[in-house]
Image (tube, grey):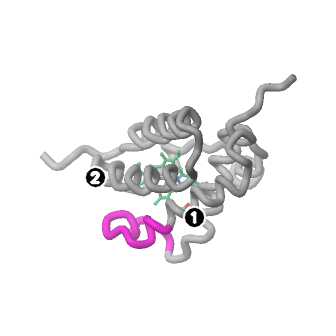
Amino acid sequence: GEAVTLYDAVGGEPTFRKLVDEFYAGIATDPLLRPMYPEDLGPAADRMRLFLMQYWGGPNTYSAQRGHPRLRMRHAPFRIGGAERDAWLRHMRRAVDSLDLPAATATELWNYLERAAYFMVNAMEDP
Ligand code: HEM
């Protein structure tokens, strides 16, 4: 039969909702990152959740609503250096840990998120 997607293996949408809710709870209080995000974090959380669901084999609602992800381009308006990347990853690490996934699954998810966060850096550190 068909390979089970990570999306299904982790429990589908409710799990991604929890991941993104935990992540945005961290963003909401972050002095470095909070100012980069819109006043209302709700729609931003929806975009992130739908993207991650799609990436891991769930419904393609993200692209139906937003088109091709082109995430580096969509992050171009924001200055993302090492400090922003590390802060983002700190909130995401806490969010992944909150899911209590089997270790191999958590590692697969985390490795992707870490690689993607390094890829999103678009600003040099101050000399
Ligand atoms: C959007 C910051 C990394 C996925 C955004 C937004 C900000 C932001 C400020 C706009 C919020 C909104 O209105 O949607 C950052 C920072 C990062 C980072 C500081 C540090 C490295 C990532 C990574 C991913 C990601 C690694 C994917 C794994 C997204 C998505 C959106 C978004 C899907 C919405 C794009 C759209 O459809 O407009 N990010 N981001 N971000 N980010 Fe990030």
Tell me what residue is drawn at x 17 percent, y 49 percent: 126
Left/right of residue 38 with respect to residue 14 in the rendered view: left
Bin the neighbour count of mark 2 within 10 Å (Cα to Cα): few under 14, some 14-19, many 20 and up.
Answer: few
Magenta includes 32? yes
Disc 1 marks a residue whose amino acid type is Asp
Q: CA distance from mark 1 to mark 2?
A: 22 Å
Give me the residue at 59% from left, 55% from top. Answer: 48
Residue 127 in percent (x, y) is at 12, 45
Q: Which residue is mark 1?
A: 21
Which badge, 1 or 2, comes first in the chain's sequence?
1
- Secondary structure category for the residue under label 1: helix
Indicate yes or no whether the magenta region holds residue 27: yes
Q: For marks 1 and 2, give the one nearer the viewer.
A: 1
Q: Position of residue 10 (x, y in %)?
A: 68, 44
Q: Which residue reaches farthest bottom?
A: 39
Frontmost residue, 122 versus 84: 84
* Stretch of the chain drawn in magenta: 25-38
Residue lying furthest right: 1
Residue placed farthest to the top in the image? 1
**Picture disc at residue 83:** 2
Residue type pointed to by label 2: Ala
Q: Residue furthest left?
A: 127
In the rendering, at what x and y percent does residue 125 appear? 21, 46
Circle 1 residues within 10 Å: few <14, some 14–19, many ≥20: some
Residue 41 to residue 53: above or below: below
- What residue is at 50 percent from the left and 60 percent from the top? 23
Left or right of 27 in this view: 20: right
Image quarter in which the N terminus is found: top right
